[in-house]
Image: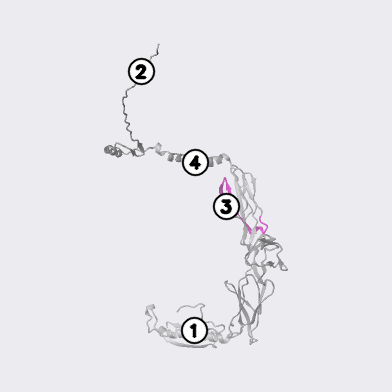
Amino acid sequence: MRDRIPRCHTKWNHRPYECIEYSLAGENPVFAFVYIDLNVRHFHLFALFGRQLLDNSCFTFGIPGDFEEAQSARNYAPDNMIFKHLEFLLVLRYFINLVALEVAAGKALPEPLNLSLTWESEFRIKLSWNAPKKLDPSCKVNYTITETIGEKKPVLTLTSNWFKEYHVTTNDAVNYTVKTNPKNCTGRTISKPVSISKPKPTELVKNFQCSLYSSKAMNCSWLPANQASDLQLYYRYLGLSHIAACSEYQYRDGQRTGCHLRGSFLQYDVYFKVNGTLDGLSVRNNFLVIPRYHVKAPAPKVKITEEGRNLILSWDPPYIGADHCWNYIFTYSKCQLLVDSKEIQSNSVTVSYDQTCQYRVKLKAVYTELCGKGGSDWSEEEIYGVDDWSTTVFDVVIPAVVFLFLILLISCFMKHREKLFPAIPHPSLIFKDMLNGNKELKSSIGNLYVPVEEEVECKISLEKDYTLPMMQPEH
């Protein structure tokens, strides 16, 4: 017998019965129970219809049967009484569900009437309806409201009123469903649902976001989604008695893309409305911003003071919220080497001081989840002290010079290695040239060039010297 959840049981003729099938039809559940007694090899199966399972007002029917006690699962033979009545069990399950549906349909309460949506203010919408007709005065009811925003998970609310107000916090389509519930109404079940929807409006702006940068000021920005000629921003929160309009718009390319707001926003939910006109029709977009989850504080400024052999790093907490709402992530380097980076709660820290090193410190503030969410950007790097040049030369310059010298040495070696280490000719090449007997020997043995000897022919000839006689002077 397999257990059911929720587990149900009852007694009949002083015997306990376990539930093997059930169907909850509002105020009129239907159950199927079985009793098995292995000692007498007997079982009894029956069903109950009605609200009170422990009194005699329930209508019941059942069949008895016997079976041989099974020693193991393989002993369940086809002629076992359990299997003989398996068809009856299946029919009984179908019959229970069918009867339950019929009973529920006949006893269902009437649904609410005239369901409607109306705007109560710039940021609130009212869902209202009328009580069902033909309702017995002694029958006390309440109403279940199901709100479904876009693709989000539905939210259920139970109320005894004939209306419910909601803050409009999104531009998504919203569907509302209302059902009548029997609160104190014997024999009646939940009514059929009635629904109404708020359609998704035309998008005027997109990427609407705000950041709280001070306890008294907040910046909001957006991107225009349509060319609305008269874009206006309005807002309201619990600490403000009236709807306020933006007075300090920010512009880009002639369009309104942001607003600078002033007020005590930290502890409140702020509701926004953007109005505009498109194609001659008025359009509104609604947004909800919870400033404590959008904190963007200015970066803290680090102060460094020397006390003996220590440095005191300190800073002022941002002017938003309480001091315990802030943690700080700080990092510092010593002699150009990162020493530490961690998150702390205090607004000061002490580090040992080495006068031969320069210290560089920066930090950012983090708004803790206990109070909200957000933080600051990294601060500007604060520098303290001067590096000892002798240490710098020894640690940095000398290794750099040695490394450069090695690079030059290797480069020079690679360029002149043929001159420094000439190639040795292979002996076989010499004997090969000798055997060939090539007179015009011009070969390259290895990388050595042997020039060809040139033969110079010298021809000498004798020519007769025709010397002219010398003339003697006349006397």
Quarter assignment of residue 212? bottom right
Q: Which of the marked residues, 2 or 3, is nearer the chain's N terminus?
A: 3
- Which of labels 4 and 2 is toward the front? 2
The reply, left or right, for residue 287 in relation to residue 415 is: right
| Location of mark 4 (residue) | 404
Camera-nearest residue between 308 and 54 = 308
Q: Position of residue 283 (x, y in %)?
A: 66, 71
**Amino acid, disc 2:** Pro
Residue range (magenta): 317-341
Q: Position of residue 10 (x, y in %)?
A: 51, 82
Distance from disc 4 to disc 1, alpha carbons, whole Å, reads 93 Å
Q: Which of the marked residues, 4 or 2, is nearer the chain's N terminus?
A: 4
Q: Which of the marked residues, 1 or 2, is nearer the chain's N terminus?
A: 1
Distance from disc 2 to disc 3, alpha carbons, whole Å, reads 120 Å
SS type, badge 3: strand
* In the rendered image, the vertical position of residue 350 relative to residue 20, given as above or below: above
Q: Position of residue 328 (x, y in %)?
A: 61, 55
| Location of mark 2 (residue) | 469
SS type, badge 1: strand
- Which of labels 1 and 2 is toward the front? 2
* In the rendered image, the vertical position of residue 125 relative to residue 34, given as above or below: above
| Location of mark 1 (residue) | 32
Distance from disc 4 to disc 3, alpha carbons, whole Å, reads 34 Å
| Location of mark 3 (residue) | 341
Looking at the image, the residue that sits furthest to the left is 435
Camera-nearest residue between 120 and 279 = 279
The reply, left or right, for residue 217 in relation to residue 407 is: right
Is residue 333 magenta-colored? Answer: yes
Distance from disc 1 to disc 2, alpha carbons, whole Å, reads 169 Å
